[in-house]
Image (cartoon, helix red, strand yellow):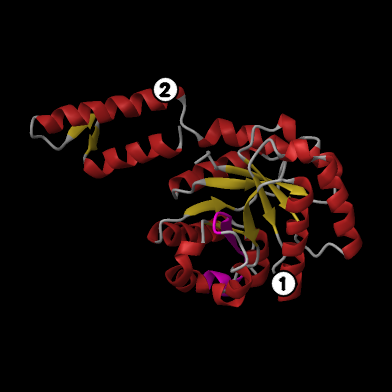
């Protein structure tokens, strides 16, 4: 599977953002249909997409659809079918916003090709509360989970604080690990605040997140330079694993390296980091 750690939103009806795609070293694109584009807006979006098929074909393509009611979902599905038919664009997955309960949308999603990746965005208290029951029942249908912190804060009457984000991230990360799903962090809305963005990257890495949703091109390179292991870290982690394995062959299960004890759980963590972050 291609690497899917960074996703950037492309407003569906603003063509100038499509033109920036070649400049962005991002893993995947999200065409954003949410917030109920009027019917006229869909005609405009269809024309924009047709003019930019080559750009949209450069990277894995996801779409954030509407999820306010059944009519909107079906309208978006019809729109995507039209795009697929007339442009031959391959849609890799769908982001489902304001997810609250899979039972509510299950019949609609029976229409979806089983190869389409479904990623749910938790943006309400009810969605957070129902996440584990939904994963318990329908985990095979869901590829990944993300947080919509801005909407979740609004629903809970919370401020966007580090403590509240830690609460959301802990819940999402735990559920994703419990059901072996990918988890992706919320957007960082302050796109000129590089230091704040980098602090968020450190935080989500500590929670085992698989990536982050992005909203501005300048965030892409910041993500790429901070989310992945450095060359020196890769070399060091591999050396630590090699030293540990050598001791293991001698019947020893503990390595001391730079005043730190490494046992099996620490070595497995390093292996995971090398697998997902290098």
The one of 81 and 17 positioned closer to us in this rendering: 81
The x, y position of residue 147, in whole percent, is 58, 58
In whole angstroms, how far apart are the C-alphas of marks 2 and 1? 47 Å
| Placement of 140 over or under 22, stated as above or below | below
| Left-right relation of 33 to 259 | right
Q: Is 82 situated above or below 158?
A: above
* Secondary structure type for disc 2: helix
Residue at x 34%, y 29% (from the top left corner): 237
Q: Nearer the viewer, residue 99 or 71?
A: 71
Q: Is residue 128 magenta?
A: yes
Residue 261: within the magenta?
no
Label 1 environment density (alpha carbons within 10 Å; few <14, some 14–19, many ≥20): some
Q: For the point 24% across and 26% down, which residue is it? A: 242
Residue lying furthest bottom: 104
Query: Which of disc 1 and disc 2 is earlier in sequence?
Result: 1
The stretch in magenta equals 114-129
Residue furthest right in the image: 40
Residue tagged 1: 68
Locate residue 90, reporting x and y percent.
Answer: 67, 47
Q: Residue at x 53, y 61 (%)?
A: 168
Q: Total number of numbered labels?
A: 2
Task: Tell me which corner region of the image, top left, top right, bottom left or bottom right, holds residue 245.
Answer: top left
Label drawn at residue 232: 2
Q: Quadrant of the C terminus?
A: top left
Report x, y in % for residue 66: 72, 65
Q: For residue 270, what is the image quadrant?
A: top left
Which quarter of the figure has residue 136? bottom left
Query: Residue 9's spot in the image, x, y percent?
Result: 71, 48
Q: In the figure, 78 relative to 230: above or below?
A: below
Residue 266 shows up from this direction = yes
Q: Secondary structure at mark 1?
A: loop
């Amino acid at each position: 599977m291609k690497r899917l750690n960074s996703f950037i939103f492309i407003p569906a009806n603003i063509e100038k953002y499509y033109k920036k795609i070649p400049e962005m070293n991002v893993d995947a694109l999200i065409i954003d249909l949410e917030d109920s584009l009027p019917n006229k807006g869909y005609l405009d979006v269809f024309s924009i997409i047709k003019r930019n098929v080559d750009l949209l074909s450069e990277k894995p393509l996801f779409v954030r659809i509407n999820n306010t009611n059944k009519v909107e979902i079906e309208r978006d599905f019809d729109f995507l079918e039209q795009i697929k038919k007339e442009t031959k664009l391959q849609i890799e997955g769908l982001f489902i916003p304001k997810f609250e309960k899979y039972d509510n949308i299950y019949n609609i999603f029976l229409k979806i090709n089983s190869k389409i990746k479904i990623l749910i965005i938790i943006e309400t208290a009810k969605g957070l509360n129902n996440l584990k029951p939904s994963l318990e029942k329908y985990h095979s249908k869901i590829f990944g989970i993300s947080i919509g912190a801005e909407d979740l804060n609004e629903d809970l009457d919370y401020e966007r604080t580090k403590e509240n984000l830690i609460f959301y991230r802990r819940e999402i990360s735990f559920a994703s690990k419990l059901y072996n799903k990918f988890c992706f962090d919320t957007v960082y809305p302050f796109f000129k605040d590089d230091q704040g963005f980098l602090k968020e990257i450190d935080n989500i890495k500590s929670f085992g997140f698989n990536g982050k949703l992005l909203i501005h091109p300048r965030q892409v390179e910041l993500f790429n330079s901070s989310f992945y292991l450095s060359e020196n870290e890769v070399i060091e982690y591999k050396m630590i694993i090699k030293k540990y394995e050598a001791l293991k062959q001698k019947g020893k299960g503990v390595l001391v390296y730079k005043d730190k004890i490494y046992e099996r759980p620490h070595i497995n963590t390093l292996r995971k980091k090398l697998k997902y972050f290098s």
